[in-house]
Image (cartoon, rainbow, N blue to C red):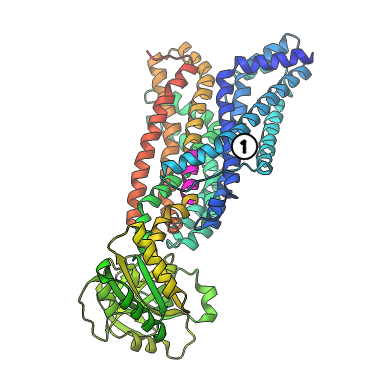
Amino acid sequence: MNKLNFKMATRGIKNNKFLYFPYILASSFMLFIFNLLIDLKSEKFILETRGSEIIKSLLEVGSWIVAIFSLIFLVYMAKTIVKNRYKELGLLYGLGMDKKSLRKILIIENLILGILILIIGSFLVILLGPLFINLVAKILKIQTEIKLSVNFSKLILGLIIFAIIFILITLISLNSIRKTNPIELSKLSQKGESEPKANVISMILAIILIGYGYYTALSINGGIFQALSKFLPASLSVIIGTYFFFRSLVIWILKLFRKNKKIYYKGTNMTFIGELIKRSKESAMALSSITIISSLFLISFVDMSAMFVGKNDLLDRIAPSDFLIQYQENDKESEKYTKNFLEKNIDKEKIENFGEFKRKGLVVSEKSYGKFSTIEDNDLKKSIMDEKTKIISLIDIKSFNMANKTNIFLKKDEAIVFDSKAKKYGKISIENQNLKVKENVKNTSYVLMDPTTSLFHNILVVVDDFDEFSKKISDGKNIKTFPSVSGVYFDLKDKSQKNIDYMDKNLNKNISDKDKILVKNSIENRMDFDKIHTGAYIVVLILALVFLISTIIVIYYKQAAEGLEDGRNIKILQKVGMSKKEIKKSVKKQNYFTFFGPLIISIIHILIASKLAFGMIQLFAMFELRKFVEIEAICIIIFSLIYIMIFRITLPIYFEMGKLNKE
C-alpha cells in the first residue's frame, strides 16, 4: 500500500505539473534569496562598507520580508492547487480509497515537493550565490574582488524556516479534506466562493494602519536619522493595512457599485462586479502581495537609481578638493610649518585652485524662521535628532571669495547664506546677533563645510569678520561647537596615479606626522568610493531584483490559478446565453481591476513615502528633494511599463487555463 501511495503521489504531481512547476520555482527562488540575504550580512565587503550597520539592518529586514511573503503566498498557492484537485481527490475517494490513504498521498506529495524545493534552493545558494554577487558587481563596474562563502549554519536556518512553512501547508491540505465524503469532495471543486461581507473591524484596521504609516512617512523632515527610526514601523503598518484594505474596503467599494443600478446593469458590469465581489476575499492575499512587493520594488529601484545619480553630489561634499591640509584655527605653529613646507617643496605649476579657509562649526536650534540659538553641551544628546537642530558653518568672506572665485564685499551687519535644503532667508540671527542676508547662494564650494556633518541640515553663514562675530555669539557660554579649523586645499593638474602617489607620500611624510595636522587625499577617496559602497549597491540591487521577479511570479501564478478556477464559471455563463465576446470583455474587466488596482495603490504608497525614502538615501547620495522626486517619477513610469508588459504577457495564460482561446 505504501508503494501504491507513493506511486499515486508522484503521478498526482506529474499530472498537475502546470500547477506545481511555478510552485516549485517560486519556493526554490524564495529560499535562495532568503539565504543569500542572510549570508550577505556577515560578508567582509559588507562589514567594510560605509554605513555597514544600516546595510545589515536592511538585509535583516529584507530577508524576513522574503520569509513572511513566502509564507503568505505559498499558502495561497497551495490552497489554490488543492482546490483545483478536489475533483481528482473526490474520484479516488469514491473509487474506494479510504480517507487515511488519501491523507497519506497528500503527505507524501508535500514531502516530495518540500524535499525537492529544499534541495534545489540549497544548490542555488551554494552554486549560484557567488556567481550572482560577482555578476552584480560586474554590472555595477565595481573592481573589488568579491568572494561569497556559504555559511552552512545560516543555510540550515533557511531550511528550517521553509520546512516549517511546508509543514503548515501540509496541515492546511489535510484539513481541507478532513470532514468530507466523496460527493462533497467532488462538489467542492465546483463550489464558488460565498459572497464575503465587508468586515467593519477589517475596514477600521485598514484605515488606522495605512493612515498611521502615511502620517509617519509625511511627518519626517527628510533627515536620515529620523527616516531610519521610522522606516520599519511605517512600512509594517502599511503592509498589514494593505491586506485589510483588499479584504474589506475593496468589497465595500464594489458593493457600492452594485447598488448603483446605472453602473451595475450597464453592459457586462453585472458579471464583472459580481465575480469580483465573490473572489475578493480569496484574492485579498494575492492582491495585497502584488501591491506590497510592487511597492518594495519601487522603493528599491528609486533608491538604487538615486544612488547612481547622486554619487557625484555626495563626493563633492565629502571630497571637494584633491588634497586638504587642516589644523586647529589657533595653532599658528602648524599653520606656519604647513605654508613654509608648501612654499618650498610644492611646484605651483603642478597644482591649481589653491585656497585657504577658516571655519567654525555650531550646533544650533531654529527657534523661528531664520532665528537660531546655540545648543549647550548638556542639551546636545537630547536635541541632536530634533528636526529643528541644524549645523552652521561660520566662515569669513575672504575664505568664501577664494573658494568660489568671487569678489564680494560684506558690511559688518551683512551675511551670505547657503542652505543645504535650498531655504532662503531675508535676515538671520544667531544668539541674537542679527545679520541682513545680502545673498542666498544656490551653490558653493563644499571645501568650506565640514564633510563629517553632511548628513545633517547644513547652513553656511559667511560674515565679514570671523573672529569678532565668533566672540559675540559665544559670550562665555558652554555652547556646542566643532573645533575651529584653518587649512589649505588644492587640486592637481596631472591626476596620473604616479603624480597622486608622489604628492600623497610627500605630504604624509613631511606634514601628517606632525601633531594636530590632518592631510586628506580626496582623489584616493573618490577612487575608493565604488569599493566602499559595494555592499550598499549590491544589497539594493538584489532587493530590487527579488521584488521584480517576485512580482512576475505572483502575477503569472495568479493568472494561471484563476484561469483554472474560472473555467467552470465560463461554461456556466455560456450556457445562460453570454457570447464568448461578452465573456472575454467581462473577464478582461476583472483582470484590469485586479491587476491595475495593485499598481495604482503601490504608486500611491511610494509617492507618500517620498520623504522617507529621500531621508534614507542621504547616506549614499546627495541632492535636493526636487531632483529626487524627478528620479522617482521616471522610475514609476519605467515600472508601470514593465508591469503592463507582464500583464499583457500573462493574460493569455488565464484564457488558456480557462479553456477560452482567443478568437
* Residue at 78 percent of width and 19 percent of height: 100
183 to 427, vertically: above or below? above
Q: Is residue 127 magenta?
A: no
- The percent coordinates of residue 511 (x first, y second) are 42, 75
In the picture, residue 507 is in which quadrant?
bottom left
Image check: 11 left or right of 651? right
Residues in magenta?
Answer: 536-546
* Residue at 59 percent of width and 29 percent of height: 77
Residue 647 visible in the current orientation: yes
- The percent coordinates of residue 496 (x first, y second) are 33, 57
Q: Nearer the viewer, residue 283 or 333?
A: 333
In the picture, residue 106 is in which quadrant?
top right
* Residue at 44 percent of width and 27 percent of height: 590
Instruction: Estimate how packed mark 1 is, as few (under 14), some (14 to 19) or many (20 or more) residues with alpha carbons within 10 Å.
Output: some
Image check: 207 left or right of 459? right
Q: Main secondary structure of the magenta part?
A: helix
